Image (tube, helix red, strand yellow):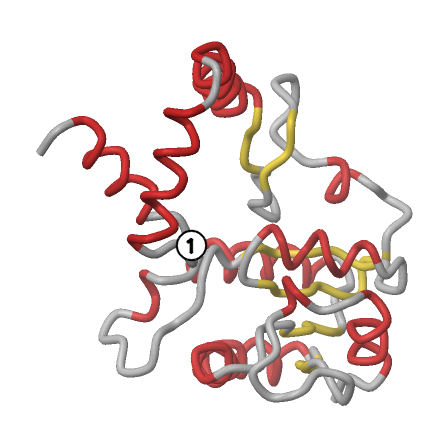
């Protein structure tokens, strides 16, 4: 396998990118000025070295002086609510609505249907640890905000099961996004008004 094919294979690992698109990326780079590729490689390395994962919500943020992101450090946010989302892009899209003022937890993925080890597909252990701390600080609602597709629904079902004991014991409400999002919808591609309506009508 030559270097061109190796690069195509790497691009194919990107979310939503198939063989044809991966090949187009490679030929795009080959047709650009050599400095473009050098700048791209340099920037990738810089992003890797300056962007870190928050030790509380696990979202990525650019900082090398603290382990906790600005959102989790913000004491003005609502301590009573915690929203669970799959990825950073979901967090960003929900923040754009300026409607939700609580805290977040990034699951890091979803649970595929028929998955034998669901606890390995999401940050389950860290979630339970964080929830134990949040409950002591007054947490009263956990909002599960996932894509309205089969994998999102399966993840919702799994989370509901593992969170039920904590919910029952501490009287913490577990809610989901309500009307506003249709079946098959991904949060990443939903507009702010749609997400705002889904938050207003959460169940």
Q: Is residue 142 left or right of residue 128?
A: right
At a point 71% along the width and 81% down the height, the residue shown is 177
Residue 25 at x, y percent in the picture = 40, 39
At a point 82% along the width and 55% down the height, the residue shown is 96
Picture layout, residue 152 above or below residue 102: below
| Residue 136, image quadrant | bottom right
- Residue most toward the left? 1
Q: Is residue 148 left or right of residue 101?
A: left
At a point 65% along the width and 68% down the height, the residue shown is 187
Circle 1 packing at 10 Å, graded few (<14), some (14-19), many (20+), is few
- Residue most toward the front? 31
Residue 12 at x, y percent in the picture = 31, 48
Residue nearest the viewer, comparing 115 with 187? 187
At a point 82% along the width and 65% down the height, the residue shown is 192
Q: Secondary structure at mark 1?
A: loop
Residue 185 at x, y percent in the picture = 61, 78
Residue nearest the viewer, comparing 45 with 51? 45
Quadrant for the C terminus in the image: bottom right
Quadrant for the N terminus in the image: top left
The residue that mark 1 highlights is 15
Residue nearest the viewer, comparing 26 with 50? 26
Residue 2 at x, y percent in the picture = 12, 29
| Residue 62, image quadrant | top right
Count of numbered badges drawn on the protein? 1
Picture layout, residue 7 above or below residue 186: above
Q: Is residue 9 left or right of residue 177?
A: left
């Amino acid at each position: 396998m030559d270097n061109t094919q190796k690069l195509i294979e790497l691009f194919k690992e990107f979310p939503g990118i198939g063989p044809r698109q991966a090949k187009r990326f490679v030929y795009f780079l080959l047709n650009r000025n050599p400095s473009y590729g050098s700048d791209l490689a340099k920037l990738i390395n810089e992003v890797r070295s300056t962007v870190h994962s928050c030790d509380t919500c696990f979202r990525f943020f650019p900082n090398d002086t603290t382990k906790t992101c600005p959102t989790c450090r913000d004491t003005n946010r609502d301590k009573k609510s915690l929203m669970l989302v799959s990825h950073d892009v979901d967090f960003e899209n929900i923040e754009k609505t300026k409607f939700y003022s609580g805290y977040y937890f990034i699951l890091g993925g979803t649970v595929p249907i028929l998955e034998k080890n669901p606890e390995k597909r999401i940050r389950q252990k860290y979630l339970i640890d964080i929830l134990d701390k949040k409950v002591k600080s007054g947490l009263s609602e956990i909002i599960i905000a996932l894509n309205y597709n089969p994998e999102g629904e399966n993840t919702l079902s799994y989370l509901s099961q593992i969170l039920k004991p904590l919910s029952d014991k501490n009287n913490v409400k577990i809610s989901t996004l309500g009307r506003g999002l249709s079946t098959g919808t991904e949060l990443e591609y939903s507009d702010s008004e749609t997400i705002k309506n889904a938050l207003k009508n959460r169940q």
